[in-house]
Amino acid sequence: MIAHLDGIAFWAQRLPGWDVASAVFIGASAAPAGIARRPAPDLLPPTERRRAPDTVALAIEVAARACKAASISPAEPASVFATTHGDLAITDYLCANLLESPLHTSPTRFHNSVHNAAAGYWCIAAGNHAPYTTISVAGYTFGAGLLEALTQLESQQRPVLFVAYDAEASGPLATLVSSRGLVGAGLLLSPCRGVSTVAELHWSLAGQSPVPITEPSPQNAPWVAGNAMASCLPLFEALARRSTPVTLAAGPALALQLEIR
């Protein structure tokens, strides 16, 4: 099956943008020396931009950048949001607050703790009334989320925005679910080739155990090391090179095979 890729977005604290990241991934330039704190998405009003947790700011930024690269209105595509853990910092806050002062739990932080918070913010900010899906499949989240987006694209024949992101773990939770830094990725997929199409994704599924996943290049792995969404890196390296086949794990015995043309 074939998906047309019209927009790419990538954000990490040392690679805050796809133009920067793609050049680093192919060895054409060095990564910036500074560490970016987090994105500040223009799509959110200033007050919401300040209040939004890192996960929401990150997801909306890469979603908006992918749409801009594809020259599509943010209000148009259906969307699939994938995050392994949601917002671990807020979950840690809620757990501590329920233990120490349960009657003083912040309603704002509570509604930001749900797994589909970023997708909800996106739909409101973008004025998007198209269907959205949020997904988490532990260590298979990126591959499973991309498979969901590709399946929706194939079955519905309408543009689909895929957004994957994870943030820093904190407090006692960090001893159980490890994640460091911020990593976000966005892909705008279309059923037809258009003026914004930058690549074709030829994809198929295979049942294999264990799944022979594509490993990231040793020189690029440190840029996302420790983040729960680090499994996205081999695909984005391949997109930067425009040639390398990639196999992602979409489940315990499910291989998502992609060829970029």
Image (cartoon, rainbow, N blue to C red):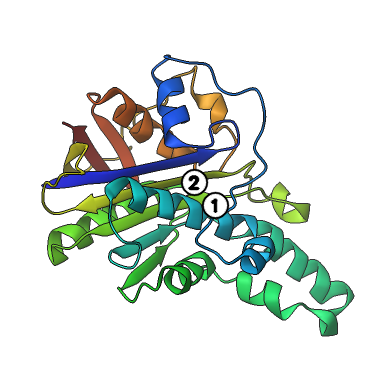
194 relative to 101 in the view: left or right: left
Residue 85 in the image: above or below residue 210 = below
Q: Which one is in front, 252 or 102?
A: 102
> Is residue 252 among what the camera can see?
no
Q: Which one is in front, 144 or 237?
A: 237
Tell me which numbered mark, 2 or 1, is placed earlier along the sequence. Answer: 1
232 relative to 53 in the view: left or right: left
Q: Which one is in front, 246 or 36?
A: 36
Separation of marks 2 and 1 at Cα, in angstroms: 6 Å
> Is residue 160 among what the camera can see?
yes
Residue type marked 2:
Gly
Residue at 22% in and 62% down: 152
Residue 79 in the image: above or below residue 35 = below
Q: Which mark is residue 100?
A: none
Residue at 62% in and 60% down: 87
Disc 2 residue crowd, few under 14, some 14–19, many 20+, Cα 10 Å: many
Residue identifier under label 2: 184
Contact between marks 2 and 1 (CB within 8 A): the answer is yes
196 relative to 239 in the view: left or right: left
- Provide residue 213's location: percent of width, then percent of height: 34, 33
- Provide residue 47's location: percent of width, then percent of height: 66, 68
- Provide residue 245's location: percent of width, then percent of height: 23, 28
Q: Quadrant of residue 111?
A: bottom right
Q: Secondary structure at mark 2?
A: strand
Q: Quadrant of residue 131?
A: bottom left
- Provide residue 66's location: percent of width, then percent of height: 36, 49
Q: Secondary structure at mark 1?
A: helix
Residue type marked 1:
Leu
How many marks can you see?
A: 2
Residue identifier under label 1: 58
